[in-house]
Image (cartoon, rainbow, N blue to C red):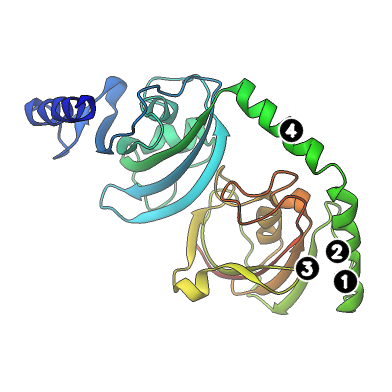
């Protein structure tokens, strides 16, 4: 009954808001507009300092998707009015909403990078957020401590497995300073990626045993993102792509510290201390 009452209030607020230039969206504080798609069972919202796990998508105002991913991160106190952090703090667990915010503020102030070329200056963008879990900092640290105690010996085990794989495949390549291995499969055009470029890649990710865990090729959906911004790819892939040229195809081996580390992926698909193989083709640089 409580959920129905809240939902009716939201519908009433949207229908009565004649000042919103975006149909179906209600105006919040500081120039943010929102549309609530799903109400959760819990009413407790996230607070600054909490850790949240969320599915996040970025769209242009014309609903063109340019990022999609699941992330676990600590919510910070909004550093300016209209910050994306205000959006995260508006939702409880299992709630889903779309927000319209300033694209300039998001890229230049939050991500501290330049605005992508496909977005106009002073334009707006949509961010769809679904909160899957909210943890206090104390809950997060307790869980992390218990987990690290359980997997304390996994680090040495990963090194052994990686060494055995390299020996078995007779890969006589030297790693980068960070531990990344690269095998060039197809040469590129010579054009390198720069910070703030919008790039399009195809990739296939698999474990050392050859089992796939992700493939844009199988989904027939190349991945496009703004290079050098947060929440896009793991740091090993960011380093890998910086080594590539447009049109190049390379195979990379990432030790876990360059991938999902000692915690594994938030989805549970990638275990802790797991080296990964990525076959990446850099299709286009804008």
Check disc 1 and report its element: helix, strand or loop: helix
The residue tagged 4 is: 146
Q: Nearer the viewer, residue 168 or 221?
A: 168
Q: Is residue 281 above or below residue 225?
A: below
Asked whether, in this view, residue 148 is left or right of residue 113, the answer is right
> Looking at the image, which residue is at 52% across and 36% down?
111
Name the quadrant containing residue 13.
top left
Check disc 4 and report its element: helix, strand or loop: helix
> Looking at the image, which residue is at 40% across and 48% down?
57
Q: Nearer the viewer, residue 16 or 200?
A: 16
Name the quadrant containing residue 242.
bottom right
Asked whether, in this view, residue 169 is left or right of residue 18, the answer is right
How much space separates mark 4 and mark 3, taking CA atoms? 35 Å
Identify the mark at residue 166; answer none if there is no mark: 1
Mark 4 neighbour class, 10 Å CA radius: few under 14, some 14 to 19, many 20 or more: few
Mark 4 or mark 1: which comes first in sequence? 4
Mark 3 or mark 1: which comes first in sequence? 1
Mark 3 or mark 2: which comes first in sequence? 2
How much space separates mark 3 and mark 2, taking CA atoms? 14 Å
Mark 2 neighbour class, 10 Å CA radius: few under 14, some 14 to 19, many 20 or more: some
Check disc 3 and report its element: helix, strand or loop: strand
Give the number of the mark in front: 3 or 2. 2
Q: Is residue 176 above or below residue 32?
A: below
The residue tagged 3 is: 182
Q: Are marks 2 and 1 in contact (CB under 8 Å)?
A: yes
Mark 2 or mark 4: which comes first in sequence? 4
Mark 4 or mark 3: which comes first in sequence? 4
How much space separates mark 3 and mark 1, taking CA atoms? 12 Å
Residue 188: image x %, image y %? 65, 75
């Amino acid at each position: 009954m409580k959920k129905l009452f809240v939902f009716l209030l939201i519908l009433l607020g949207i229908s009565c808001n004649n000042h919103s230039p975006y149909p179906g969206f209600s105006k919040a504080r500081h120039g943010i507009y929102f549309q609530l798609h799903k109400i959760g069972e819990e009413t407790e919202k996230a607070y600054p300092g909490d850790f949240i796990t969320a599915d996040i998508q970025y769209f242009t105002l014309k609903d063109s998707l340019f990022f999609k991913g699941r992330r676990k991160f600590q919510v910070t106190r909004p550093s300016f009015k209209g910050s994306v952090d205000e959006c995260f703090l508006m939702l409880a667990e299992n709630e889903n909403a779309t927000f319209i915010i300033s694209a300039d503020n998001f890229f230049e102030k939050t991500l501290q990078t330049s605005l992508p070329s496909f977005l106009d200056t002073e334009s707006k963008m949509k961010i769809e957020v679904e909160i899957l879990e909210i943890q206090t900092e104390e809950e997060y640290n307790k869980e992390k401590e218990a987990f690290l105690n359980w997997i304390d010996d996994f680090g040495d085990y990963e090194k052994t497995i990686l060494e055995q794989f390299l020996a078995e495949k007779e890969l006589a390549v030297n790693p980068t300073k960070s531990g990344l291995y690269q095998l060039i499969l197809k040469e590129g055009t010579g054009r390198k990626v720069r910070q703030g470029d919008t790039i399009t890649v195809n990739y296939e990710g698999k474990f050392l045993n050859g089992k796939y865990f992700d493939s844009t090729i199988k989904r027939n959906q190349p991945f496009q993102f703004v290079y050098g911004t947060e929440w896009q790819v793991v740091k090993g892939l960011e380093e890998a792509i910086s080594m590539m040229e447009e049109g190049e195809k390379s195979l990379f081996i990432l030790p876990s510290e360059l991938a999902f580390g000692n915690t594994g992926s938030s989805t549970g698909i990638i275990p802790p201390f797991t080296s990964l193989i990525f076959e990446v083709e850099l299709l286009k640089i804008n």
